[in-house]
Amino acid sequence: RGSVIVDSLVTVNQTGTVAGTSNSIRQAVSTGFVGQMSVDPNYVIIGNGVTGISVVGNYYQDTSVTFTCSADIIGQVGNVGVIWKLKNAVINPTTASRWRTETLPDDPQYPGRRQYQLKVNPMHTGDTGNISCHISDGKLQSDWTIDVAVIGKPIVTISPMTTTVHQGDSLNIFCQVVETYGTPSSITWHKNGESFNGGPDEIIDRANFTYHVLKISDIQTSISYSCLGVNVAGTGKQATTTITVIQSGISYKYCPTDIDMYGKRWNGTIGDTEVIVPCTGDKTAN
C-alpha cells in the first residue's frame, strides 16, 4: 500500500466563484473521499503561497522565540527564496546578531511544502511591532505578517536614591512600578542584597501591587534597600536607596546642599559618601 499526491485542475464557470469552489473542495476532501478515491482528509492545497506563520515561545523580554513560515509552492518558475522583515525593515542576520534564519528540510510526504525559520534570542522590547515573511520564485511573491507585542520586565523607581540621616532617625522610602507592559506586576524588596519582607522597625505599606512605602524607624547603621518589579516576563532591574547614618560622637566633614549649573539640587551630606539623584532618561549622576 502507498499514497500519491494528486494534482487537480478545476475550471470555475461563470455562475461560480473561486472562494465557493475552494470551500466545496475542502469539504469534500475532509470526508476522506473525492468520488471513489480515498484521500487524506487533513491535506489539501488550494492556491500557491504562504499559508501562515507559527510561533514557538512567548513574547517575553530575554526569551528565545522561533517563527516558522510555511508555504505551498506549486509550479515554481525559478529558485524560491525568503525575506524576513521586522517592522518593514529587512532582517540580515550576522554572526553577532540576535537573529538566525534557517530553511527546514523538505517533507517527502508533502513535496510542495517549504518551511523557513526565523529565530531570535534574546527577544527585546524594541522588537514589538510586526514580523513578516516574503517568499518569491522570482516571478510571483506571497507574504504573511503577524503582530508581536513583547512583554518586558517591570521598571521601578525608588525615592530617595541616597540620603543621609542621624542615628535614630526615621525615613520613608517610596517604590513604584512605572512600566508594567500592560501585565499584572508586583514589588519585592531586598535589604543589603538579601531578600527582605519587613521587620519590627521596617514596615512595608503595600498601598497596591505597584506602589509600596517602606517605613523605617530608629535607623542605627548605614544600610541599603532595593525594590524590584516582577511579572510574567521575570524580575526587572532593581532600584536602590543607600542610607548613610551620622553617628553621634564622631567628627565628620560636611558637604552642604548645592544646586549645580544644570539646576539640579544636591542635598547636604557628609564626606566620603556617594550621592545619586534622578536624571532624565536612563542615566544616573553622582
Image: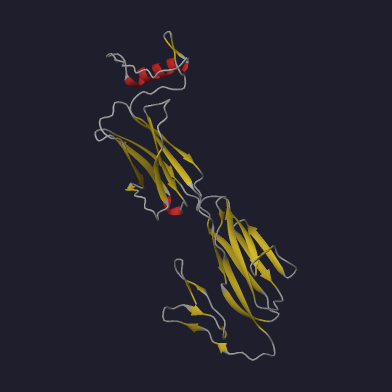
Number of numbered discs present? 0
Q: Quadrant of residue 110?
A: top left
Q: Position of residue 141 (x, y in %)?
A: 29, 35
Please identify the residue farthest to the top as the structure is shown: 36
185 and 43: which is toward the camera: 43
**Position above or below: 104 against 26:** below
Residue in the image at 58% along x and 58% along y? 229
Q: Quadrant of residue 101?
A: top left
Q: Residue at x 45, y 16 (%)?
A: 2
Q: Is residue 214 left or right of residue 263?
A: right
Residue 13's place in the image compared with 75, above or below, is: above
Q: What's the residue at 29%, 26% (across, down)?
A: 75
| Quarter-of-image position of residue 227 | bottom right
Q: How is the image coloured?
A: secondary structure
Residue 32, given in percent of the width and then of the height, sits at 47, 15
Judge whether 10 appears above or below 85 on screen.
Answer: above
